[in-house]
Amino acid sequence: MKGLFKSKPKTPVELVKLTRELLMYANRNTETREKKREEKISELSKLILEIRTVLLGSDQSEPNADACEQLTREFFREDTLRLLILCLPKLELGPRRDATHVIANLQRQRVESKLIACSYLEDNFDLMDILILGYEDGDIALTYGAIARECIRHQSVGKYALESQHMKNFFRYLQNPNFDIASDAQATFKELLTRHKSTVAEFLSKNYDWFFKEYNSQLLESPSYITKRHAVKLLGDILLDRSNSAVMVKYVSALANLRILMNLLRDSNKNIQFESFHVFKLFVANQNKPPEIIGVLVTNKSKLLRFFSDFNVDKVNEQFEADKSLVIKEIATLELSDGRTVCPNDCETTC
C-alpha cells in the first residue's frame, strides 16, 4: 500500500522554484527557531542535490537535454544564482560541493544555442566582486574561488575581473599563509592571465607598469619558494604566448627584469632554476637587445657560460638541451659594440 502514495517527481521548473524559495528564506536570516531553520537548510541541501542530478545525471541515468534546458531557463529567469552564491556560507561542505557542481555545469548549458549564464553574469558583474572577495574569508575562499574560475570561462566576465581593482588584491591573496587558499588564488590568477588571449594581451599592454612592478617585487622576489616557483612558471607561460609578443619584448628589454631572472637562476631550488631558464632565454634570444642588457650579459659572460655548462635537469629533455645550446652559443658570441669587454660597475650581476 505504501507504494500507492509515492510522491510525484518534481519537474525541473518546480525544483528551481522550490530552491529559490528556500534560498530566500535562508538569506533572510530572520528565523529564530533553530530546529526549524535546520530543517529548511536540510531540505534546501536535498533540492540542490536533485538539481545536480538533473544536470549531471546519476549512476542509473544520463542527463536529459530537455530537462537541463528547462532547469537552466528557470534558474536564470530570476536571481537564483545570486541567492545561491549568497547562501553558500550557510551550507555544509557536502551541499556546497553540490552547489559548486551545479553552478559550474550551468555555465556550459545552452538554451536555444545561447549561454544564458554569460548574459546573466554580464548584467550582474558584481557577483564576481563577491566571489573574488571570498579570498578574504578562509571559510568560503575555496568554494568561491572554484566558482569564480568557472565564471571566468566567459570572456566578458574575465575582462571585467582583469579590469577590476581585484587584480591588485591577488598579489596579497597569493601570499596567504594558508597553503590551500594561496594555491586556489594562484589557480584563479593563472586562469585570468591565460584563458582569453586577446583580453589578456590588452590588459597587460594597458597595465604593464604597475602589474609587472608588483609581479616582480611581490612574487618573483618573494621569500616563499612556492610563491616564486608558481610566479616564474606563470611568467614563462605569459611571455611565451604569441598573443603577448609585444609585452614580452618590452619585458625582456628591461635591465631590472634581467637582474631578477639572473638571481632566480642562482636559486638553490632546481625547479625554480629550470623555470627561470625559460624566461632568461628570452632575454638572450632578443635580437634587439638594449646596450645595457648586452653589457650585463657580456660582463657576466664567463660566469654564465660556466653556469650553463653544468646546468642540467634530472630527466632527459631534448628541448631543454636544444635551448641551452642556443643560449650558450648566443652568449659566447656577444660583445660590446665599442669593443669593450666590461660594462660599468653598477651593471655587474653574478650568476
Image: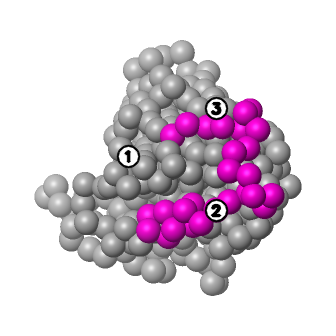
> Is 313 positioned to the left or the right of 216 in the image?
left
**SS for dot 3:** helix
Residue 167: x, y in percent? Answer: 72, 42
**Viewer-proximal residue among 227 and 322:** 322
Mark with earlier residue (3, 1): 3
Query: Which amino acid type is shown beneath numbered disc 3?
Result: Gln
Residue furthest out toward the right: 206
The 10 Å Cα crowd at callout 1, few under 14, some 14 to 19, many 20 or more, is some
> Is 65 positioned to the left or the right of 280 in the image?
left
**SS for dot 1:** helix
**Viewer-proximal residue among 153 and 140:** 153
Query: Alpha-carbon distance for marks 2 and 3?
Result: 32 Å
Query: Which amino acid type is shown beneath numbered disc 2?
Result: Leu
Mark with earlier residue (1, 2): 1
Query: Alpha-carbon distance for marks 1 and 2?
Result: 28 Å
Query: How did the renderer colour the structure?
Result: one colour
Residue furthest out toward the left: 1
Q: Which residue is mark 2?
A: 334
Q: Which residues are magenta?
A: 324-351
Q: Quadrant of residue 216?
A: top right
